[in-house]
Structures are given as C-alpha cells and as structure tokens.
Image: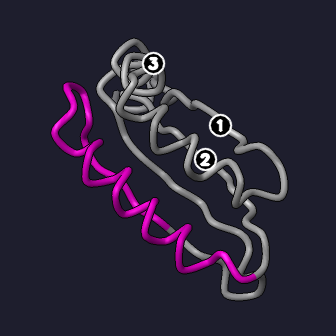
Amino acid sequence: MIKVVIERRCRPGTENEMERLLVELRTKAIPQRGYVSGETLKSVDDPSLWLVLSSWLDVNLWNAWQESAERQEIASKMEPLLITPEKVSVFSFIWDASWWS
C-alpha cells in the first residue's frame, strides 16, 4: 500500500471553487481500482493551503488514476486557481518483519 500527499495553494477568493473541485475529484477517485481511502484538509492558519491524503493499493494503480483523462480534466479546472503547481508526493510503508518477532 502507498500514501499519496498532494499539496495545493489556491489564490485568495477561490477557496469555494477549490473545495468544490476537490470534492468532485474525490467523488471520482473513490470508485477507481486501487483506491482505499482519502482525506481532504484545509489549513487552519492558511486558507490557501489544502492537503489531500489518499491511500492506494499500489503505485501503479495510483499512476493510472493520476494520468487518467477524468482526473486530468478536473486538474485542468484547478490549475487557474493555484498560486503554484500542485505538489504530489508518494510514500510507501516501512516494513520490517523483525518488529513483530
């Protein structure tokens, strides 16, 4: 399993539209093969900062969603709202069998 962290910074005054697009994106991600769960977070201290955390079965399934026309269409609607390009980071879990012995 992997975790995907996406950081977005939106322009002031576009927060409502950003939220609407993030909800649309999540709604379309949920039925995708490999999607496990997700959270959408807005900074308490900085209303322009949004984080999306999602879990996927593996990086290939995440990549398929990331490159899909469906996701790209919504991302293109978000792009004009952003101060900087979205930052995507993919993390894997550390597994060491010795922890369990």
Closer to us: 98 or 65: 65
Sooner in the amino-acid sequence: mark 2 or mark 1: 2
Residue in the image at 70% along x and 44% along y? 86
**Circles 2 and 1: CB distance less than 8 Å?**
yes
- Image mark for residue 63: 3
- Crowd rating for badge 3 (residues with CA inside 10 Å; few <14, some 14–19, many 20+): few
Q: Position of residue 12 (x, y in %)?
A: 78, 79
- Crowd rating for badge 1 (residues with CA inside 10 Å; few <14, some 14–19, many 20+): few
> Most extreme residue toward the bottom, as rendered?
44
Answer whether residue 16 is magenta in the image: yes
Image quadrant holding the N terminus, namely top left
Residue in the image at 58% along x and 30% along y? 90
Which quadrant of the view contains residue 2? Answer: top left
Compared to 63, does 22 lie above or below?
below
Query: What range is drawn magenta here?
Result: 13-40
- Image mark for residue 56: none
Residue in the image at 51% along x and 39% along y? 4
What separation in Å lies between label 2 and label 1 (alpha carbons)?
4 Å
- Could you say whether the residue bearing mark 2 is in a helix, strand or loop? strand
The residue beneath circle 1 is 88
Sooner in the amino-acid sequence: mark 3 or mark 1: 3
The residue beneath circle 2 is 6
- Could you say whether the residue bearing mark 3 is in a helix, strand or loop? helix
- Crowd rating for badge 2 (residues with CA inside 10 Å; few <14, some 14–19, many 20+): some
Closer to us: 72 or 32: 72
